[in-house]
Each structure stands twice: as C-alpha cells, then as structure tokens.
Image (spheres, rainbow, N blue to C red):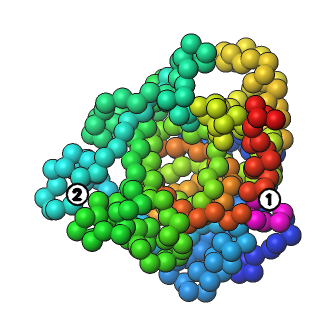
Amino acid sequence: YPELMFEPPNDGSYPPLLDMSKIFEFWGQDDLDSPPEIIPEVLQHFDYQNPHEVAAAEKYRDLELPFKVYNVPEVKAAGIKWTDEYVADNFNDVGDDDTPRSYGTAQQSVDSFFAFYYPERWDVDLLGPSPSLDIDWTYDKWAQHAVYADEVSLSPNEKHYYWQSGVPREERLKKRRHWTFVSRDLPSFSSPEPTFFGFNPPAQKGIQCRFGERGVTAATHYDGGRNMIAMMTGAKRYILSPPNACKKLGIVSSRHHPSFRHSMLNFGRVTLLDKKDTGVKMSDREREWLRIAGSAQTLSTVLKAGEVLYVPSHWFHYIVSLQKSAQCNTRSGIHEDGNRNFGGMRDVRQCTLDRDED
C-alpha cells in the first residue's frame, strides 16, 4: 500500500493515473488465474477504527478523490454472516426471524461481458440480440453456478450469470422491524441519520447490491451520486477514470439509445488491437474507439472483502469480478463541481450532449 498522506494533494498528482492500455497490458482482464506477482495499490487506505485516519479520509471525500477504508466492523461482520444459506433464506423468505423478504434478479450473458441497457428501449430488429437477459433463477441456483465457475476456472467465452438486488430508499424511514437483511446488516448504509458512508441521507436513493461470479465484467459507466462501495465477500477489480476522460470512453450520448450514459466497449480488448489471429471479431468502429479508450487516464484497484471504496461523483467505473463476490453500495447525492484537476458534472454533460438533438 502507498504511504499514508493525511493531507490530500490537490495538484493532480493523486490518484496517479496511467493510459488504460498500460493498465491492461500489465494485467489482462481475463488473466484471473495468472495475476502479476505484485499488484501495486495506488489508492490511499484508511483504518476506519482510527479517528485520525477517518478525518483524513473525509478530506479526500470533500475534494472528490477516490480512496478506501478498511476495518469496518459491520462490513466484516456481514462478510462472515452472508453465507449462501443465509442470503438464500432472505431471498426465499424462509428465515427463522421476522426479517422481511428480499427480492433479486438473475441476469445471463453469452460471455463474461455485461453491457448495461434499458430493456424497454432495446430494438432487436435494429440492434440485434440484447447484451444480457433476465432469467428466472433463484439465488440458490445462481450461487451454485458461481461456486462452479470458481471451481472450474470458467472461461470468459462461456455464459456468465449475475445476481442483482436493491433496497428502496423508503426502507430506511421505516421502523427497523421492516428492514430487509441488507439494511439490518449494513446500518451505516441505511441509517436515516448521517454516517461516514451515507453522509447525505435525504439524497440517498437506496442500497444496490451486486453478486458477481468469476469473470463477470460490467461495462464502464458513471453515477451522479457520491458512491460508497462495500465488499462483503470475494474481490472485484475496479478500473476508474475521472470525469474529464469521458470523451475517450465511448460513452453513449444519445438519450434515446438503450445504453445512454454507459459504454458498450469491452476495454479488455485494448490489448488485442495489434495482435493477429486473436479469434475475436471486432468492427472497424470498435477498433477505432478502443484505440481512443486506450489513451484514457485510468487507475486499477482490487477491492477485497472488508474494504469500502469511495467513487466520487461522475467518476467512471469498469468492474471485473475476480471470484464469487458480494458487494453493496449507497450514494450520497451529486457533487456538481467535482475536482478541479479531474473534472465533474460539466465534463460529463458536455461529453454526453445528445447529438441527436443538436
């Protein structure tokens, strides 16, 4: 880990960024079984049990700079508590207590890459098959496949599955007996009062949880809300790019497109552009955009069980699940200005200006 800096630099030197192509040349997206011997960490890590370090983390948060915290009791406890049996019981409503039932959805992709889209806007005749499908699996069935994926080192070219669930924003305002297991187990995320993680409760839009299996890769996108992401089990690799990198990321700018404000680019392919006989079919347009994306300023970090990652407003994140994993996040409203060195909402709005409406 890098040496702690209690005073955050605000000169553009933190966090250190590299061209995206170098990020994936160092560690290929699909090289899950052969990672580099040493994976350098570029983000500051703060001990949540140390008041001085928490105060420092708040300074980074106020400057809209990414960082991590660790040693968070409720996240560590949830990591132990969230066995497949416990989580499945809550989704199947067969628990021994009075916890209300939770709901989730399984998604399937033809391979490991999941590109976001609004299903109601996807025109199959115009755009072809959708990037993924909602399927009627239970959590139990998803978990069994995720275990299998780890056991056999599932190939990125095979079908992959993702489990998603959310807690509505209204739940935190109810009496605790009406809270589902996520709210109960992560009280700092669900509290109606300000906490380090949910520091603007009126702007909180609920809690989103993602259960990934080995290899599942979520296309890059941004969230307006200031985002705290807790990893309960497993590990995920986060590829972050600042708002002022938007124009290089292939973000869909048409509001009528089903993938508006997301990219449909598989960034892992930036390492294939100058190789022959890769077996991967890419259009000229995809190749052109991947060359552009390869020069986007980027960082890579592995979020491990027990850690919480702060992703500032409008920072882009591209996520690779390294193994079976469980992660939840909550957002605390929009920071419009962002950081003077890395941009903010204005950069993203200019980048996603709907060309169809010019």
Q: Residue at x 79, y 30 (%)?
A: 289
Q: Earlier in the sequence, mark 1 or mark 2?
A: 2
Label 1, on which residue? 343
Image coords of residue 105 (percent x, y): 36, 39
Depicted 191 relative to depicted 52: above or below: above
Residue found at the very far front of the displayed protein:
357
Q: Main secondary structure of the magenta part?
A: loop
Image coords of residue 248 (percent x, y): 80, 40
Q: Which residues are magenta?
A: 337-344
Residue type at mark 1? Gly
Depicted 86 relative to depicted 78: above or below: above
Q: Is residue 53 left or right of residue 145?
A: right
Depth check, front residue: 50 or 113:
113
Depth check, front residue: 51 or 148:
51
Q: Is residue 206 left or right of residue 340?
A: left
Depth check, front residue: 44 or 2:
44
Whether residue 160 appears in magenta in the rendering, the answer is no
Q: Secondary structure at mark 1?
A: loop
Specify whether residue 99 is in view.
yes
Quadrant containing the C terminus is: top right
Q: Is residue 170 left or right of residue 315?
A: left
Label 2, on which residue? 100
